[in-house]
Image (cartoon, rainbow, N blue to C red):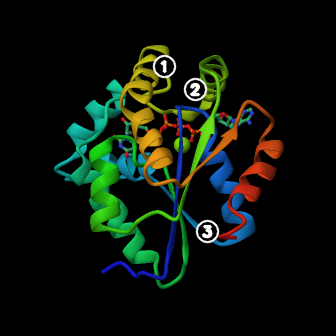
Amino acid sequence: SISKDISVVFVLGGPGVGKGTQCSKLVKDHMFKHLSAGDLLREEQNKEGSEFSEIIREHIKNGTIVPQEITIQLLKNAIFENQNKFKKFLVDGFPRKMDQAIIFEEEVIPAKLALFFDCTKEVMMERLMERSKTSGREDDNVASIEKRFDTFVKTSMPVIEYLDNTRHIIKKIDCTKSVDEIYVNVQEALKSII
Ligand code: UP5
Ligand code: MG
């Protein structure tokens, strides 16, 4: 089972806002284990013989949310496998739908904090179009990006509001700035943990 001594931080925000970028910096400086839900899903999608490949591929291409039981199982396994080595976990890009938030905090572990990376759509689109030149990601094209934005606004913003108004664990960070300026604010927001 999952140890009660670990700290989980949710890292949330729209597509291309810079979740992965900031998590990589925290890993270098502060001994976090970084778990990106999207990366875990892409890895499962590419695993030979996975019964979930097709369903994951379809959801990622359409920018919709993979059924929560698949993602929660992947996260739970990854935390379990790493909890002897790490005490602090960055859960990046999750939860992004209400059912995921409720079930994860009930059945896996409640988060200590949640970062909300806030940015304009124009800036996020620009970052993703730049990344699309080299990322090889099947969802880095204008049609998929528009769908990811839609899902973020309709389905994921309510989770951020719940974590803010009901759980009181949201720290909002302006992510229109440079990577290093944002990182100063990220570390400040996490000072009770790092
Ligand atoms: N960049 C970063 N910060 C910058 C800055 N301050 N200034 C200038 N450039 C900056 O950054 C994106 C690009 O911007 C990079 O080129 C970076 O160098 C530059 P990155 O750090 O990669 O942004 P990130 O927020 O991680 O963007 P990502 O595309 O990964 O976010 P998404 O939330 O869209 O993608 P994710 O991988 O989390 O999810 C993909 C899909 O998986 C979802 O759409 C969904 O279909 C599925 N999914 C689920 O179904 N359930 C889940 O729980 C999670 C995912
Ligand atoms: Mg990412």
Q: Residue at x 39, y 41 (%)?
A: 96
* Picture disc at residue 132: 2
Quadrant location of the N terminus? bottom left
Q: Earlier in the sequence, mark 3 or mark 2?
A: 3
- CA gap, disc 2 to disc 1? 7 Å
Compute the Cα span from label 1 to label 3. 31 Å
Give the amino acid type for the residue marked by disc 3 in the picture. Answer: Phe
Q: Which mark is residue 32?
A: 3
Looking at the figure, which quarter contains the C terminus? bottom right
Q: Quadrant of ligand 2?
A: top right
Mark 3, secondary structure of its residue: strand
Residue in front for this viewpoint, 41 or 1: 1
Q: Residue at x 65, y 70 (%)?
A: 193
Using the image, tell me which numbered label, if any, was put on residue 76: none
What amino acid is found at the position of numbered circle 1 in the picture? Asn
The picture places residue 7, in percent across and down from the top left corner, at 52, 72
| Residue that appears at 48% across and 33% down | 137
Task: Name above or below for residue 87 compared with residue 74.
Answer: below
Q: Nearer the viewer, mark 3 or mark 2?
A: 3
Which of the marked residues, 2 or 1, is nearer the chain's N terminus?
2
- Residue 34 quadrant: bottom right
Residue at the image point whose x is 59% and y is 20% from the top: 121
Q: Position of residue 148 (x, y in %)?
A: 43, 26
**Image position, residue 24 (x, y; %):** 66, 55
Mark 2 touches mark 1? (CB < 8 Å): yes
Q: Which mark is residue 141?
A: 1
